[in-house]
Amino acid sequence: MPVITRFTKSGFTITKSLGTNILLSALVLAAVASTCFTPKAWALFEDDDARKAILDLRKSLAATQSATAELQNQLEKLKTDNAQLRGRIETLEKQAEELLTKQKTYYQDLDSRLGQLEPRTVEVEGVAGTVQPEEKKLYDDALKAFQTNQLKKADVDFSGFIRKYPTSPYLPLALFWLGNTKYALQDYPGAITQLQAFVKRFSKQARVPAALLTIGNCQLESGNKTAARKTFNEIIANYPDSDAAKQAQQALGAAK
């Protein structure tokens, strides 16, 4: 609409229709402005922002709690897995230990069995030598027979041993025990022969005084008191600190 003005002495005036439109527009703008920018309106905007922020925080907190719960579940699973793994490790360690023990026992038993089949170097009361497995067994069997009073078996076994193993480190003992076996069987000549062979060949052996005492007893019991006295005096003179010397001293009374 065109603007119609009228000049007067005091200035200019706006036509009624144009003025009315302008006035209405101004009133509308004032009403809008009064509605939008009052303290209550500002408070409305602030409540919406706060509500949105709270909702966002709640969503974030829920997500964090969910992630935390998931991590906690994973941690518990790891703990369970570790416990199971430790149990398996302990079981494996125990099985390995048992296996090592069995292997050690097996090899020890194997070594023992092989040792029974292989020659061994031994020292028997100062006499060293190589011993065959069957050699040691024959000697042990003969000695066991003597100790259990199976005198005839011991006589046969010791005699067989001496013939079969004349260089054995067990030979001195075989001669000594064979002589005592024959003495127990009252084979005095046989006992004297074996024990004299023992004393002559192994004069430094610790059993010599005992062998001489048995010889003296054989001589005494067979009625040869002169020979017996000579043997007992030899023991007393050469082995004064031995048990055989004490027994020889006592036997002299019977040899008079």
Image (spheres, grey):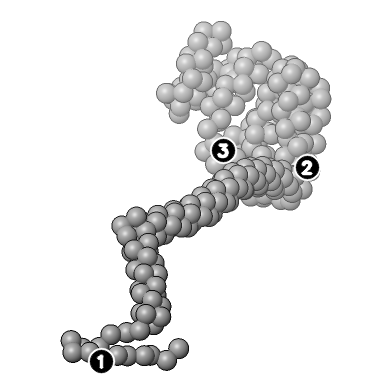
Q: Name the residue beneath numbered marker 2.
A: 134
Q: Could you tell me if the residues under marks 2 and 3 are in contact, i.e. CB atoms within 8 Å?
A: no
Q: Amino acid at mark 3?
A: Glu
Mark 2 / mark 3, whichever is N-terminal: 3
Q: Could you tell me if the residues under marks 1 and 2 are in contact, i.e. CB atoms within 8 Å?
A: no
Quadrant in which the C terminus is drawn: top right
SS class, disc 3: loop
**Residue found 73% across the figure and 25% down from its top:** 144
Where residue 9 sits in the image (x, y, percent)? Answer: 18, 89
Disc ID at residue 125: 3
Where residue 88 sits in the image (x, y, percent)? Answer: 65, 46
Q: Is residue 169 left or right of residue 79?
A: right
Residue at the limit of the structure toward the left, as seen here: 10
Q: CA distance from mark 3 to mark 1?
A: 161 Å
The nearer-to-camera label among 1 and 2 is 1
Mark 1 / mark 2, whichever is N-terminal: 1
SS class, disc 1: strand
Q: Is residue 46 visible?
A: no
Where residue 119 sits in the image (x, y, percent)? Answer: 71, 50
Q: Name the residue beneath numbered marker 1.
A: 7
The nearer-to-camera label among 2 and 3 is 2
210 to 168, vertically: above or below: above
Q: Amino acid at mark 2?
A: Glu
